[in-house]
């Protein structure tokens, strides 16, 4: 086998095992055939490069699969890209992946990243951002590729409510007086039933996944109607904590369910909530 053929093979290598096979092939060619010194040097250099790449792949690439990063920054106000926003929640939705939506949190400089596998290349995903005290961003589409452009999202701070003003010795609230509180439903009995899933930061939709909640004493069971995921939760005050078990074998620990007093919404510490 000549060096040109070996270089052609090298362009098709994408796993550490294939790199190791190339090294063996090169060494075999060196010892099996008597080739000119220049070609031998080229093969030797190629073998060294293959061994270095293979070592790096084994160290940095889990299970021999290439990983690519989709990176970006969140900043505020939208007109100042230099003002990174820390602790913002960034959500990425990729069709066909499990889970469908992933979440990460920005660092102190507002930066974030998601790992993307080659199987997602060419798909059009959506990302959006939420942060306490800021207006949620609208979903933005992006095409996944090995070398995507960095994502940049600017958030606008939520306008502050008008402060109370003073007329003489009388303090007048700028906000109207709250309506008298109505009788609230009894928790946890009102949690029983079907709950539509809604995604954090997205507009409320009617055609969504449905979940069943069943409460018995201080134990709550949560099951998605397609039977792909279920969990058992223990009551702690007005919250429930437990694990979700997915159909692909994954278990998510310390999932928190927090119903509102009016029993219309159940928030979670994940990327979705329930509202009916």
Image (cartoon, rainbow, N blue to C red):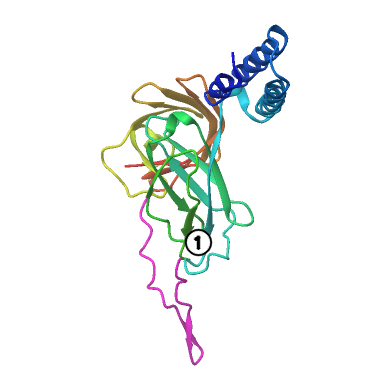
Q: Residue at x 55, y 19 (%)?
A: 5
Q: Residue at x 36, y 30 (%)?
A: 211
The dominant secondary structure in magenta is loop
Locate residue 236, reporting x and y percent. Answer: 57, 37
Q: Which quadrant would the C terminus be assigned to in this image?
A: top left
**Mark 1 secondary-structure assignment:** loop
Q: Quadrant of residue 11?
A: top right
Please identify the residue farthest to the top as the structure is shown: 32
Locate residue 14, reporting x and y percent. Answer: 55, 24
Can residue 75 be found in the magenta stretch? no
Residue that carries the numbered disc 1 in the rendered image: 133
User: 154 and 181: which one is in front?
Assistant: 154
User: 229 and 172: which one is in front?
Assistant: 229
User: How many numbered dots are placed on residues in this image?
Assistant: 1
Q: Residue at x 40, y 22 (%)?
A: 228
User: 79 and 67: which one is in front?
Assistant: 67
User: 196 left or right of 107?
Assistant: left
User: 26 and 169: which one is in front?
Assistant: 26
Locate residue 32, reporting x and y percent. Answer: 69, 7
Vertical placement of residue 126 versus 242, above or below: below
Vertical placement of residue 5 versus 162, above or below: above
Q: Which quadrant would the N terminus be assigned to in this image?
A: top right
Q: Residues within 10 Å of mark 1 (few under 14, many from 20)?
A: few
Q: Which residues are magenta?
A: 158-184
Locate residue 12, reporting x and y percent. Answer: 52, 23
């Amino acid at each position: 086998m000549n060096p040109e053929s070996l270089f052609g093979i090298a362009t098709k290598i994408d796993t550490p095992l294939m790199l190791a096979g190339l090294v063996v092939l090169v060494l075999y060619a060196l010892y099996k055939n008597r080739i000119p010194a220049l070609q031998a040097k080229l093969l030797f250099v190629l073998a060294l490069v293959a061994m270095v790449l293979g070592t790096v792949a084994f160290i940095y690439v889990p299970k021999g699969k290439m990983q690519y990063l989709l990176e970006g920054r969140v900043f505020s106000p939208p007109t100042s890209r230099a003002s990174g926003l820390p602790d913002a929640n960034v959500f990425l939705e990729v069709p066909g992946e499990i889970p469908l939506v992933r979440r990460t949190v920005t660092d102190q400089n507002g930066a974030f990243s998601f790992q993307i596998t080659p199987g997602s290349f060419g798909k059009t995903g959506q990302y959006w951002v939420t942060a306490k005290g800021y207006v949620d961003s609208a979903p933005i589409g992006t095409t996944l590729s090995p070398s995507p452009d960095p994502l940049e999202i600017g958030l606008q701070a939520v306008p502050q409510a008008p402060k109370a003003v003073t007329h003489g010795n009388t303090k007048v609230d700028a906000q109207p007086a709250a309506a008298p509180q109505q009788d609230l439903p009894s928790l946890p009995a009102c949690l029983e039933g079907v709950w539509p899933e809604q995604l954090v930061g997205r507009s409320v939709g009617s055609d969504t996944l449905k979940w069943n909640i069943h409460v018995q004493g201080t134990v709550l069971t949560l099951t998605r109607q397609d039977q792909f995921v279920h969990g058992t939760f223990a009551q702690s005050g007005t919250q429930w904590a437990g694990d979700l078990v997915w159909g692909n074998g994954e278990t998510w620990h310390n999932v928190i369910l927090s119903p509102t007093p009016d029993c219309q919404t159940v928030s979670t510490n994940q990327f979705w909530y329930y509202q009916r």
